[in-house]
Amino acid sequence: LTWMAVTDDFFYSQESQDKGRTWSVPRRIAGAWNTINVFDARLDTQVMAPDSAGNLHLIVVGRLTAEQRDMSLLRFVWDGSNWSAPEVVTTVDSTISGDVPQWPSVWISGGNRLHVAWYLRKAEMRVSSSQEPGPFELYYSTAGIDAPAVAPLVYPTVTPVPLPTVTPSRVGAKPTVVQVNAVASDVTMDSLK
């Protein structure tokens, strides 16, 4: 479980070993600061996805130092006991443009391919919440990660099997079953009763 604190400038995490009945003491995720002191956006999110080795990849919008004013998309990796140092996915020069990366998504394909998507909140969209939504700029990044490849699921090819057709006959008479492209062992009169 991770969250961005609104009372200070940090990200925190907790873990549970018993499916959520009890939780560890909250601990700060080292090496990153959130954006609360440079951009008042309490609605942003942190997202995670597991790779094939069981590591969790956390994506957040944050900063590498308390003094940094530019906002970065950062990746951390949880190995089951600790968070890695942050890796910068991208940095937006927010102090000049006023643009802000927000609402990241993350997924893993093939067990070892990281995919991250986010949108850029343009400065003109930050003036007033009553404004019509402006143009959104969507971004995407992908990279290989250190985890075993996993073969994609192979879905079976469905081949339609013709159903027996019933030939109309006199009222009260039993229908005659006519097989289409089937062998006698596929359908019997007993299976139709």
Image (cartoon, rainbow, N blue to C red):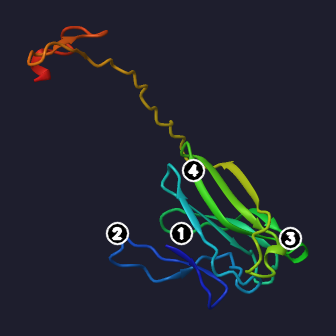
Give the distance between the C-alpha atoms of the residues marked 2 and 4, in whole angstroms.
Answer: 23 Å
Give the CA separation, mark 3 to mark 1: 30 Å
Residue at 36%, 73% in the rendered image: 20
Q: Is residue 141 left or right of residue 53?
A: right
The answer to whether the residues at label 4 and label 3 have Cβ atoms under 8 Å apart is: no
Specify which label sits upstream in the sequence, 4 or 3: 3
Q: Earlier in the sequence, mark 2 or mark 3?
A: 2
Going by the image, does 49 lie left or right of 172?
A: right
Residue type indicated by callout 3: Asp
Report the front residue among 103 and 60.
103
- Mark 3 or 1 closer to N-term? 1
Q: Inspect the image, locate mark 2, and give the three-letter code of the amino acid beneath it.
A: Lys
Q: CA distance from mark 4 to mark 1?
A: 20 Å
Residue for badge 1: 82
Give neighbour class at mark 1: few <14, some 14-19, many 20+ (Cα, 10 Å).
few
* Residue at which label 3 appears: 93
Residue type for callout 1: Asn
- The dot on residue 108 is 4
Q: Helix, strand or loop at disc 4?
A: strand
Label 4 vs label 3: CA separation? 28 Å
Q: Which comes before the other along the chain, label 4 or label 1?
A: 1
Please determine whether, in this image, residue 7 is positioned above or below residue 12.
below
Q: Residues within 10 Å of mark 2 (few under 14, many from 20)?
A: few
Position in image of residue 87 (x %, y %): 70, 63
For label 2, the residue is 19
Instruction: Determine whether the residue tagged by mark 2 lies in a helix, strand or loop.
Output: loop
Nearer the N terminus, badge 2 or badge 4? 2
